[in-house]
Image (cartoon, grey):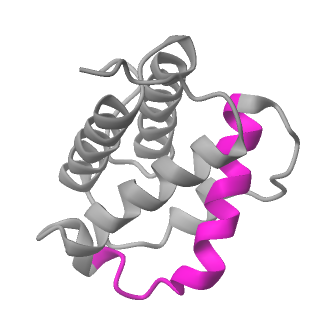
Amino acid sequence: MTALPDIIDREDVIKFVDRFYDKVKIDALLGPAFAHVNWPRHLPIMYNFWSSMLLDDQSYRGNPLQRHLDLPIGTEHFSRWLELFQETIDENFVGLNAEEVKMRAQAIARVFQIKMGLTNKDM
């Protein structure tokens, strides 16, 4: 069995973002919540976001929280999003950056849920 690589460059980010959102699009819970998304426009934004978060390439400009505030989503959506995200990373990568991106996704989901009033800071 070949060892999985770590996430080391933008091509790796594109790989995990594409594979992750392929799962999201067909997921019974998340698919409908993402049905309005213009994927050809959204995916490059996600490449920039995760490249900026993980590789510090400063390609992302924007306010991701603002884009999510009015969506009809709850804690169950965030739980499923994290489950699919971590599953995608674990299926494709292993290493320090792979662990870092999973931790950052958890932190982002937590902050979004607090700011959206879905959970409190003590949880």
In-front residue for pair 119/36? 36
Q: Residue at x 52, y 28 (%)?
A: 101
The relative height of residue 3 versus residue 11 in the rendered view (above or below) is above
Magenta region: which residues? 33-54
Give the left or right position of residue 110, taking residue 97 as reference. left
Give the left or right position of residue 18, taking residue 85 as reference. right
The relative height of residue 86 versus residue 121 in the rendered view (above or below) is below
In magenta segment, residue 36: yes
The reply to whether residue 73 is visible in this rendering is no
In-front residue for pair 81/97? 97
The relative height of residue 45 versus residue 91 in the rendered view (above or below) is below
**Location of residue 95 in the rendering, given as x and y in whole percent from the top left corner:** 48, 13
Q: Picture quarter containing residue 123?
A: top left
Q: Picture quarter containing residue 27?
A: bottom left
Q: Quadrant of the N terminus?
A: top left
Q: Residue at x 80, y 53 (%)?
A: 60
In magenta segment, residue 102: no
**Location of residue 84 in the rendering, given as x and y in whole percent from the top left corner:** 26, 46
The reply to whether residue 98 is visible in this rendering is yes
Which SS does the magenta portion mostly show? Answer: helix
Residue reaching furthest front?
Answer: 1
